[in-house]
Image (cartoon, rainbow, N blue to C red):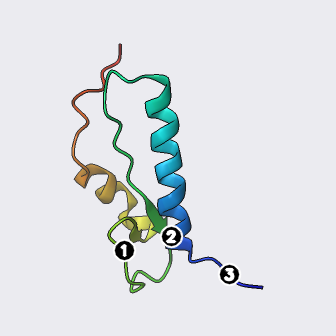
Amino acid sequence: MRIENPLDRTARDAERVRRWLAHDDQDFVVRVYAAVIAPDVSLPRTPTCAVISRDQLPAWLRSLPLQRSLTEG
């Protein structure tokens, strides 16, 4: 059985989420970022998916650009 690359699958799932959110409300552009949490962060990341450890998750989330178009409203 062929195994799919988890980074490719994560990036594809993130794109599906982005399209799903954008379909419901087209007043703003939704940015979705993909990341795989792995114990071995030496895995090569791709242009569409980051590879981070569980400890790096808070810092990675803080490093993402703010989505100015989203408000509480």
Q: CA distance from mark 3 to mark 1?
A: 18 Å
**Quadrant location, the N terminus:** bottom right
**Quadrant location, the C terminus:** top left
Q: Is residue 5 above or below residue 70?
A: below
Q: CA distance from mark 1 to mark 2?
A: 8 Å
Identified at 47% across, 83% down, the residue is: 40
- Per the image, the residue denoted by label 2 is 8
- Per the image, the residue denoted by label 3 is 3
Q: Amino acid at mark 3?
A: Ile
- Please tell me whether mark 3 sits on a helix, a strand or a loop: loop
- Please tell me whether mark 2 sits on a helix, a strand or a loop: helix
Asked if the residues shown at circle 1 and circle 2 are in contact, with their CB atoms under 8 angstroms apart, the answer is yes
**Mark 3 or mark 2: whose residue is earlier in sequence:** 3
- Per the image, the residue denoted by label 1 is 46
Identified at 35% across, 18% down, the residue is: 72
Q: Amino acid at mark 1?
A: Thr
* Neighbours of disc 1 within 10 Å: few (<14), some (14-19), many (20+): few
On the image, the x and y values in percent for residue 25 come to 43, 22
